[in-house]
Image (tube, grey):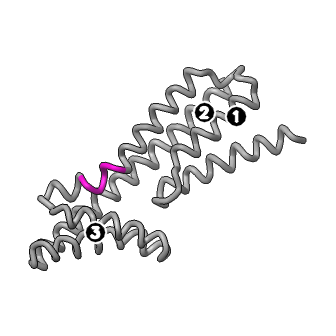
Amino acid sequence: MATTALWIAVIALMAAGVVGTVVPVIPGAVLILAGACLGGWIDDWTRVSWWTLGALGVLTVVSVAVDFVAGSVGAKRVGASKWAITGAAIGTFAGVFSGLWGLLFMPFVGAAIGEYLTQRNVERAGRVGVATGVGLLVGTAVKVALAFSMIGIFAAALLV
């Protein structure tokens, strides 16, 4: 009975991790790694090796790096100001509290407002907002791919 509850916890951690790849406040890859560690421990490390956890750890670091770099890469490609990048970060934080549409659009809005405050040019602010948003969307897609790769590696370790 206790083992079943622990495996349910593994699944819950990994599911929360997948959600965390889209929701900025939840550390998605870290939760998936925690679930894999718990799964390895439950199995007494017979099928989930330290090599598997090492690979998952590397993917976790890559996912966290993508999280930090994604939005700023899009913004920097169009020469965004530091205010625009700060605005995107504030918009992302505010988006967490305003639902799905806030999560999707607040980073764009924040970057555009930050750039407008610096340049006073609506067209440029719009370009920076869109570039920041595209960077965040590409980063999210990469994080989702990494999350499913991590889960696949863990599942393969259990099944092989």
Image quadrant containing the N terminus: top right
Amino acid type of the residue that numbered disc 2 sits on in the rendered structure: Phe
Mark nearest the camera among 3 and 2 is 3
Residue 118 among those drawn in magenta: no
Q: CA distance from mark 1 to mark 2?
A: 9 Å
Q: Would you name the residue on which mark 1 appears?
A: 39
Q: Which mark is residue 87?
A: 3
Amino acid type of the residue that numbered disc 1 sits on in the rendered structure: Gly
Q: Nearer the viewer, residue 152 or 12?
A: 12
Q: Would you name the residue on which mark 2 appears?
A: 154
Left or right: 49 with respect to 76?
right
Q: How many residues crowd around disc 2 within 10 Å: few (fewer than 14), some, or many (20 or more)?
A: many
Residue 111 position within the rendered picture, expressed as x and y whole percent measured from the top left: 25, 69
Left or right: 49 with respect to 142?
right
Q: Residue at x 65, y 48 (%)?
A: 13
Residue range (magenta)? 68-72
